[in-house]
Image: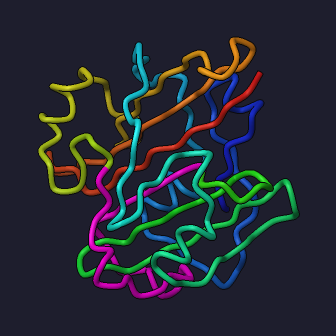
Amino acid sequence: MLLRLTFAAAACCTLSSAVLADEFAFSDFAETVVIGSVSLDNARALPAQPVSTITAGKLTVTLEKTRLEDVQVAFGGTIQNDGEAGNGITWLCYAAADATLWFSAFTGDGTVSQVTSEADTTHAATSGCSQAPAALTVIDYGIPGLGAPLADFTAKFGKVEDDVGLYSYSSEVTAPESADFRIFQYVIVIAPAGTISGITVGQATSN
């Protein structure tokens, strides 16, 4: 199954799922977060957005503004799609030397809704991923990421109990453009040995 974040789901802090194309397979973290069903009801609520800017090589990614086509122009690759228009997911993924990197869009406008990094390249080929160019080796979220101790992450955002091995955080703030809109952002990490081996950051705006 492929995960999509709907505006209704954002309102109730839940991630829902759609159908995964048979030709693709995902590794454990991606399957759980990118294409699984993850509840954020028990996520630690943060007073402010944990992530403001995401840097991928030479590209600055702003959630809900940067388009998948912008990522493709910067790094190449093939845009994949699963599901019906307006009710599916579109993504680009890349296999770097020691990580698999995803840029996913859950809305029909093609803007990046979620960015995911995983310290595993086992399933990159069967996930429709392209080889990452030399300019794309890691994604910088501006917070402790792949390879960082989980303790660094919890020192910054507070401790939270793991849920099926995942540590989840979320925020909901008023959109600067209009008080009628709310921006819901979430961060999920996995650290099975006390070191972050997977991280995803996603966002949705709703009224």
Q: Residue at x 55, y 76 (%)?
A: 72
Assign the C terminus to one quadrant of the image. top right
Q: Nearer the viewer, residue 178 or 148?
A: 178
**Quarter of the view holding residue 156:** top left
Relative to residue 127, is residue 33 depicted above or below?
above
Q: Residue at x 32, y 67 (%)?
A: 57
Q: Position of residue 172 (x, y in %)?
A: 55, 19
Q: Position of residue 144 (x, y in %)?
A: 21, 43
**In the visual, does 174 lie left or right of 99?**
right
**In the visual, does 187 lie left or right of 9?**
left
Q: Residue at x 57, y 38 (%)?
A: 203
Count of numbered tags: 0
Relative to residue 87, is residue 98 depicted above or below?
below
- Asked if one can make out residue 36 in the rendered structure from this viewpoint, the answer is no
Q: Position of residue 42 (x, y in %)?
A: 47, 22
Q: Position of residue 60 (x, y in %)?
A: 42, 55
**Quarter of the view holding residue 6:** top right
Q: Is residue 138 magenta?
A: yes
Q: Nearer the viewer, residue 127 or 96?
A: 96
The chosen color scheme is rainbow
Q: Nearer the viewer, residue 1 or 173?
A: 173
- Asked if one can make out residue 173 in the rendered structure from this viewpoint, the answer is yes
**In the visual, does 112 lie left or right of 6?**
left
Assign the N terminus to one quadrant of the image. bottom right
Region in magenta: 113-140
Q: Is residue 130 magenta?
A: yes
Q: Residue at x 54, y 77 (%)?
A: 73
